[in-house]
Image (cartoon, grey):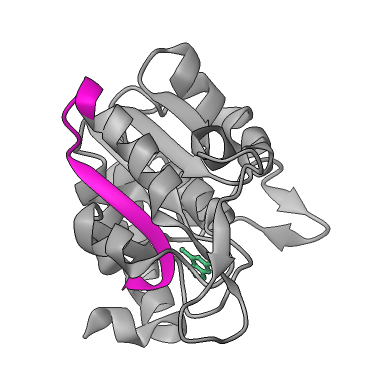
Amino acid sequence: MRIDIITVLPELMQSPFNASILSRAKEKNLVEVHFHNLRDYTVGNYKQVDDYQFGGGAGMVLMIEPIDKCISGLKAEREYDEIIYMTPDGETLSQGIANEISLKKNLIILCGHYKGVDQRVRDMFVTREISIGDYVLSGGELAAAVLCDAVIRLLPGVLNDETSALTDTFQDNLLAPPVYTRPSTYKGMEVPKILLSGDFPKIEKWREDQALERTEQKRPDLLK
Ligand code: 6GU
């Protein structure tokens, strides 16, 4: 997978991509992530990327011209499966959307800022608009990092235990069951005996029951 991220704050995005699973995915050549600083695509001497909105009102709007230059340059080099705009008025990210996007090859992710982007960018280029929840962030960068994390960890070969993503919370619309590790007794608190029994069919049944019970208690909306 190749991901091109267009942003006015590339430095905000470095650390999530240089740690843990995402850096391992890059080292294994399972994903390439390229950052494009919108300021490098400006036309005048002032490196201006935003301007006041027509009609008046508070807040700056990202201008179409640098975004057009950046996206058109990328599109001239390869086909993109999706041009995603990160915006709080997009569809809310879910495990299902992450699964879908993980099947794509080339993605552009445009990070919004200030009051957003000129609507003509959305009309002309954007194929999908994604939010990470009903609250407002100061820019799309952190949301883009969340989306990339959710997607990249699903790429075959990224996780060490290949089956691990299948048992995540939200796959199957169920929360994951409780997990335990050593020691088996800690300050009088015991690990459920069944997990120490070695009876794997029974353990599997217990986990399914626990997942269902946990979902009923904490997220009954998922069962509807
Ligand atoms: Cl994608 N962008 C911004 N600015 N705020 C958000 C968001 C995105 N998703 C939730 N809040």
Q: Quadrant of the C terminus?
A: bottom left
Considering the whole magenta stretch, tell me its main secondary structure: strand
| Tag count | 0
Residue 211: say if magenta: no
The image quarter in which residue 78 lies: top left
Residue 14, position in %: x, y?
64, 34
Q: Which residues are magenta?
A: 76-93
The image quarter in which residue 129 lies: bottom left
Vertical comparison of 44 with 54: above or below: above
Residue 127 in view here: no
Residue 145, position in %: x, y?
52, 47
- Which residue is pictured at 63% across the width and 66% down the height? 138
- Which residue is pictured at 20% across the width and 49% down the height? 100
Towards the viewer: 63 or 221: 63
- Which residue is pictured at 52% across the width and 30% down the height? 21
Q: Classify residue 173 as left or right of residue 142.
A: left
Q: Classify residue 160 as left or right of residue 224.
A: right
Residue 157, position in %: x, y?
33, 22
Vertical comparison of 31 with 180: above or below: above
Residue 37 in view here: yes
Q: Classify residue 14 as left or right of residue 43.
A: right
Outermost front residue: 44
Q: Quadrant of the N terminus?
A: top left
Towards the viewer: 117 or 138: 117
Outermost top residue: 28
Q: Classify residue 207 as left or right of residue 12.
A: left
Residue 92: say if magenta: yes
Towards the viewer: 37 or 162: 37
Residue 206, position in %: x, y?
35, 61
